Image (spheres, helix red, strand yellow):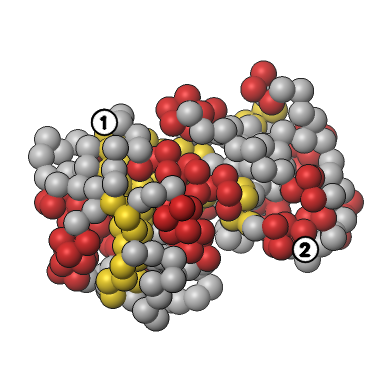
Amino acid sequence: MPESVAVTGGNGRVGTHVLEHLDAAGYRTVNLSRGRRDETHSDAYVETDLLDAGDVYEALAKSDPDAVVHLGMIPTPDRAPGHRTYESNVMSSYHVLEAAGELGVDTVALASSFSAIGGGFEPEPITIDYLPVDEDHRLTPSNPYAMGKQALEIAADGFARRSADAPQTITSLRLPWVVDDELARETFVEADRTLAGLRDSAHFHTQRNTLCGYVHATDAVTLVEAAIEASFHGHERLWVSAPDTSAETPSAELAAALYPEADYREQASNHGDPYAALIDTSKAEQLLDWEPIWSWRQLA
């Protein structure tokens, strides 16, 4: 089991949650970031340009971790030109995987995204064949951010095929929007989350294109911990979601109204929850013994 974890992008919102959780769980943590020096949530900080292969190698060699959590990428497509966003997703992941393999770091968890499917920030409506979506669903991204997330997963496939100089265990976590209590209360509890309310919202396109998906930080960080403790060999993609949607309309009705071309398949794992997520996380449960717990409805 790993004792030391390097987290890239530890200054970010999700990175801070991850570092706090891993620190509380007893891991030695190292924050690899390019921004301000911040050792508040980690045992050490190493300034790192994740787009520089030598910098990444040196930072990991200095940190000497047993596992790496790679979160240090441009988080949305509107913060930089498209080619920079794509580069951030793909090349930083390549450098991390390459350096980890050469340094004998066996385990890497990568921050992929819901956007890899071709939703999220896409200007056109999301393409959905069936619901809930699982890891077998086709991917149709077209914007630089989403294409970069798909590409980092393909790079991870390639490293997993290597017989040497590669991490043994690589997990791509397809994260949706990660919320804390404050964000959930503001966005979900204090808003009209019925289908009619969603249609009237300025963010209706985004909500539809993300399948009304989200995950709370407390669930996201336990999945990250499960990924760095995993013992499977190779690369696995995992969908991430809360147990329910962010809508106040039952999921079957939501699917029929917003995704009429999709085949809606109610699953036994939903435990009869009428608001069950439209994202299937059963692979994460089977592979890593992880199951999301937190729902925004407990704040209502």
Relative to 212, residue 164 above or below: above
Q: In terms of secondary structure, where does tag 1 sit? A: loop
Examine the rendering and report whether any part of residue 197 can be seen: yes
Name the spot of residue 249 as percent of width and height, x first. Answer: 84, 41
Amino acid type of the residue tagged 1 in the rendering: His
Front-most of residues 82 and 197 = 197
Residue 57 rendering spot, x and y as whole percentages: 16, 63
Residue 250, placed above or below residue 26: above
Residue 135 in the image: above or below residue 66: above
What residue does disc 1 label?
Answer: 233
Instruction: Locate residue 100 relative to residue 44 in the image: left or right.
Output: left
Instruction: Look at the image and tell me whether residue 159 can be seen.
Output: no
* Mark 2 and mark 1 residues within 8 Å of each other at the beta carbon: no
Q: Is residue 184 left or right of residue 172?
A: right
Image spot of residue 53 (x, y percent): 18, 66
Q: Amino acid at mark 2?
A: Glu
Q: How many residues crowd around disc 1 within 10 Å: few (fewer than 14), some, or many (20 or more)?
A: few
Number of residues whose C-alpha sits closer than 10 Å to that of mark 2, classed few (under 14), some (14–19) or many (20 or more): few
- Find disc 2 in the rendering and name its residue: 186
Q: Is residue 207 above or below residue 30?
A: above
> Is residue 203 shown left or right of residue 234?
right
Which residue is at a point 22% across and 61% down the rendered structure image? Answer: 63
Residue beneath the point at 39% across and 49% down: 26
> At 71% across and 63% down in the image, what residue appears?
182
Q: Position of residue 282 (x, y in %)?
A: 54, 28
Is 243 in front, or is 118?
243
From this viewpoint, which residue is outermost toward the bottom?
36
Label 2, label 1: how far apart the Cα atoms are: 41 Å
Q: Which of the two labelled residues, at mark 2 and mark 1, occupies the earlier sequence position?
A: 2
